[in-house]
């Protein structure tokens, strides 16, 4: 690692690295060294309406799911844990 590239944060998160990568790309207020915990408030970490839509589209593409309208709620996108839980349900139903 160079002096300008932060070391990756070791994660014991309950999700896979692709999910975390998508979320970190949307969370402009989360530093690379910050832990993304299941209860991190996504809006406080920088997720706004545009990044929510982008995140939704990326997750649908990566995991080959479609979020039904009734899952497009503030609750679903409140925390990484909530979003991962919904994504897991959609993948299992898939």
Image (cartoon, rainbow, N blue to C red):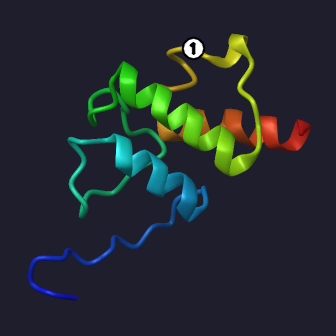
**Residue 74 place in picture, x, y as percent:** 50, 15
- In this view, 1 is above or below 70: below
Residue under circle 1?
A: 73
At x 39%, y 31%, the residue is 51
- Could you tell whether 84 is left or right of 64 in the image? left
Residue 11 spot, x, y in % from top left: 45, 67
Picture quadrant of residue 85: top right
Q: Is residue 81 above or below residue 41?
A: below
Q: Is residue 29 left or right of residue 17?
A: left
Q: Position of residue 35 (x, y in %)?
A: 33, 57
Foreground residue among 42 and 38: 42
Is residue 34 positioned above or below 26 on the image?
below
Give SS at disc 1: loop
Q: How many numbered dots are placed on residues in this image?
A: 1
Looking at the image, the residue that sits furthest to the left is 3
Identify the residue at horizontal 61%, vertical 16% (top origin): 72
What is the quadrant of the C terminus in the image?
Answer: top right
């Amino acid at each position: 690692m160079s002096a300008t590239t932060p070391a990756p944060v070791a994660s014991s998160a309950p999700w896979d690295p692709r999910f975390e990568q998508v979320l970190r790309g949307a969370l402009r207020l989360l530093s690379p060294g910050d832990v993304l915990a299941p209860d991190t408030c996504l809006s406080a970490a920088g997720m706004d309406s545009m990044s929510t839509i982008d995140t939704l589209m990326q997750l649908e593409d990566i995991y080959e799911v479609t979020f039904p309208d009734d899952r497009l709620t503030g609750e679903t996108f409140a925390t990484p844990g909530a979003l991962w839980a919904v994504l897991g349900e959609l993948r299992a139903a898939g």
